[in-house]
Structure formats: structure tokens, C-alpha cells
Amino acid sequence: MTGAEIMAVVGFMVMLAGAGWRVWARVEAKVKVAEDRADRIGERADKVAADLAAFRVHSAETFATKAGLQEQTAQLLRAIEGVGNRIDGVHERLDRVFEQRTSNRRTSN
């Protein structure tokens, strides 16, 4: 082999190594971008999990419990029963008013 042929083979090998290195560098860059994106998504997931835990605590402290709902329902039912009793008493009072009117008419004639 002559010097020119050796230089051509060495040049070809250097060119292949350079192309391989360039491809490897591009793959590494894309892997780095994907790792950074995964880290950001992981941080956001951690923040969302912390927010959800805080909301669960807040809702447990703030919103109605089963016992609280039962107590409020009992109070409402008692109030409705009281209104019903008053409505039942209205017809008795109306009867008394009409009885007084009819008895007043009979005595005044």
C-alpha cells in the first residue's frame, strides 16, 4: 500500500469516527432533554401530590361529616314538624272564629 492509499483509509476511518461521534452526541443531547423534562414532570407531580394532600386535610376539617349531616337533618325535621303543628292549629282557630261569628249573629237577632 502506498502512502496515499493509507491516508485515504485513515481519512475514511476518521470520517466514520467523526460521523459516529456526531450521531452519539445528538443522541446524548436528546437523552439530556428527555431527562430534564422528566425531572420537571416529577417535580410537578410532587407538587400536585402535596396540594392534593393539603386539600384532603382542608376538606376533612371544613366540610360536613356524616354525624353533622344527621344532626342538621334532625333539626330540619323538627322545624318542619313545628310548622306542620302550627298549620294543624290554624283550622282549630278558624273554627273558633266562625263559631263566634255564628253565635254572635244568633244572639243579636
Image (spheres, rainbow, N blue to C red):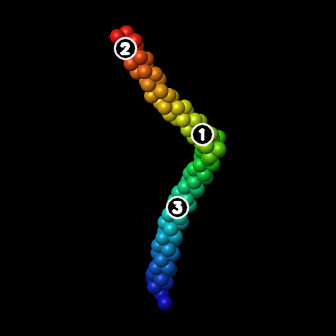
Q: CA distance from mark 1 to mark 2?
A: 47 Å
* Residue at image point 47% right, 30% down: 87
In the image shown, does 89 or 100 lie closer to the viewer? 100
Q: In the rendered structure, find residue 85 and report the number of the disc placed on it.
A: none
Amino acid of disc 1: Ala
**Viewer-nearest of discs 3 and 2:** 2
Q: Who comes first in sequence, dot 3 or dot 2?
A: 3
The residue carrying mark 1 is 74
The residue carrying mark 3 is 34
Mark 1 lies on a secondary structure that is helix
Q: Who comes first in sequence, dot 1 or dot 2?
A: 1
Residue 92, given in percent of the width and then of the height, sits at 47, 27
**Classed neighbour count for the residue bearing mark 2: other residues with Cα under 10 Å, few (<14), some (14–19), many (≥20):** few
**Viewer-nearest of discs 1 and 2:** 2
Q: Do the residues bearing badges 3 and 2 touch, measured as CB atoms within 8 Å?
A: no
**Classed neighbour count for the residue bearing mark 3: other residues with Cα under 10 Å, few (<14), some (14–19), many (≥20):** few
* Residue at image point 34% right, 10% down: 109
